[in-house]
Image (spheres, rainbow, N blue to C red):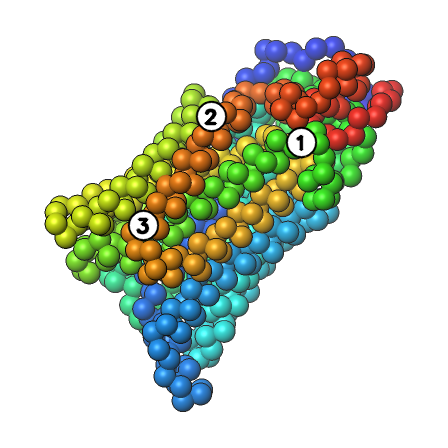
Amino acid sequence: MAEELLLENDGKPDTSSSLQPLTKPLLAVAFLASFGSSMLYGYNLAVVNSPAQYIKSFYNETLKESYNWTSDEELLTVLYSLTVSIFAIGGMIGALLVGRLVTKYGRKGTLVRSAALVFIGGALMGFSRVCRMPAMVIIGRFITGVHSGISLSVVPMYLGEIAPKNLRGFLGLVPSIHICLGVFLAQVLGLHELLGKEEHWPLLLSLVVFPTIIQLMLLPWFPESPRYLLIEKGNIHDTIEALKWYRHKGNIQAEIDEMQEEQRSLSSIQTLSVWGLLTDRCVRWQVITIMVLNIGMQLSGIDAIWFYTNDIFKDAGIPDLNIQYTTVGTGAIEVISGMLGCFTIERLGRRPLIIGGFLFMGICCAGITLSVLFQEQMPFMRYISVGCVVGIIAGFCIGPAGVPFLITAELFKQSHRPAAYTVAGCLNWMSNFTIGFVFPFLEATMGAYCYLLFCTVCLGVAVYAIFIIPETKNKTFMEISQMFASKNEIPEEELNSNGHLKMAVMNGYGTLGLHNQK
């Protein structure tokens, strides 16, 4: 019966169903998937900022106890930088695993299974002080990084595939709101009045297990991605049930027709390898685009601010007693900015948020340099510096924080999408590691001028977006791929020689052979 339902409508989709309403199941799964995954990423980015001195003291004490060796400040800085940046190394490894995991276990299945990593990493960090083993902190950060590397790609992939096209932008930015919430939560809990005391820092690092428990209790009850079920698994019955669960009302036949059309356009439903993606001329500019966006969002300087907020405010002349409250204030700005981006993306589109966000961040980076250079002559400039930090955070959370992950799902079709997220994730985490490890030394060498490097990156990405990236709002995956056809130099005769051949190229796939249609 399900097969007959899928095949009986060969006509044009019912346009009356093109705009789907936001249902409670869609909203629930978006928040639940993000709560136990994306929020942990934001939390882990910022949680090491508040207890930095306590962690360094712990390393110094244990080295002295075990080896009778008193560390100098430079070695402690290296160890702390390793603690910060090892999270990104784990994230890069997690990103490399995404393609295999989502193909074997599905999108939801991968999120559920990867949650075990949070419990392992959280336990190691939580008991590190009791066991007097600094390595447990570093290994715990690494393991939670692997989890974040997986979930940071899988969550937007999952939400992008279950969302109707008119809601992809809104649902796609729900994870970015949770990233901002995670950062804000880490900053609030890191206050001295709460868990910001020396004896509490292991607990502060290990709290990541609690959101994961809630996610594991509820997420398994939600359906898998309908596109994964139909295109990769060929499970028509479960596809229909999943669509009915997420849509409730409306004509799901139109969406099934679109999925079948995509399926027929593929020469193979097997997931493409990373090498196959990189060598496919039909998605050349899509690949370049996700590279530019993911490297740019990390080298914009945002991670330097998240990792070392307290140090930046201290250098700006903010009194020590006020730094932690200033930091929490920036976290509140992040949440508000993330919500602003989420609720405006379907009205403004993807390009304006990318271009505006990076331009504003570039201006603020230049402002930090100027304010730090002239604060001795003009003491009020310290407040300009704080304002520029807030501006960078706000500009990032409005657009660049979430749009690159969303647009990665939109630029590629089913068989290319896992490999695309693997490439994007690896570059994202490599850049994250570079900033996390190098920034303290870069700041020590260049001083305030290091922010001019971030300014250059931000402006460069904005220029690229202006000239290269098309608007993908309310576009089907076929339409988006067709928009890149001229940039990828696909000959006109290949686009129009026959219907099936045209479909293959429009979908952004390198296979240009004929497809039989039964």
Mark 3 is surrounded, within 10 Å at the Cα level, by few (under 14), some (14 to 19) or many (20 or more) other residues, namely some
Which residue is painted at 43% across and 59% down in the image? 438
Distance between mark 2 and mark 3 Cα atoms: 27 Å
The residue beneath circle 2 is 466
User: Splitting the image into 4 quarters, where does residue 368 fall?
Assistant: top left
Q: Which sits earlier in the primary sequence, circle 2 or circle 3? A: 3
**Which of these two is toward me, 316 or 54?**
316
N-terminal of the pair, mark 1 or mark 2, is 1
Query: Which residue occupies the foreground of this view, 453 or 157?
Result: 453
Q: Is residue 236 visible?
A: no
Q: Furthest-bottom residue in view?
A: 68
Q: Which of the pair 341/16 is nearer the observer?
A: 341
Q: Is residue 273 left or right of residue 487?
A: right
Q: Position of residue 89 (x, y in %)?
A: 54, 58
Taking the image as shown, residue 76 lies to the left or right of residue 313, namely: right
Whichever of callouts 1 and 3 sits on the residue coming sooner in the sequence is: 1
Residue at screen point 74% across, 40% down = 276
Instruction: State the mark number for residue 356.
Output: none
Residue at screen point 66% across, 26% down: 488
From the image, tell me which residue sits under label 3.
Answer: 449
Amino acid type of the residue tagged 3 in the rendering: Tyr
Q: Is residue 501 above or below residue 170?
A: above
- In the rendered image, residue 284, in percent from the top left (x then y), is placed at 65, 33
Quarter of the figure that contains the C terminus? top right
Q: Amino acid at mark 2?
A: Ile
Distance from the alpha carbon under mark 1 to that under mark 3: 37 Å
Q: Which mark is residue 283?
A: 1
Disc 1 marks a residue whose amino acid type is: Val
Q: Tell me if mark 2 has few (under 14), some (14-19) or many (20+) residues whose alpha carbon lies within 10 angstroms of its own.
A: few
Quadrant of the image containing the N terminus: top right
Q: In terms of depth relative to the viewer, which is nearer, 325 or 421? A: 421
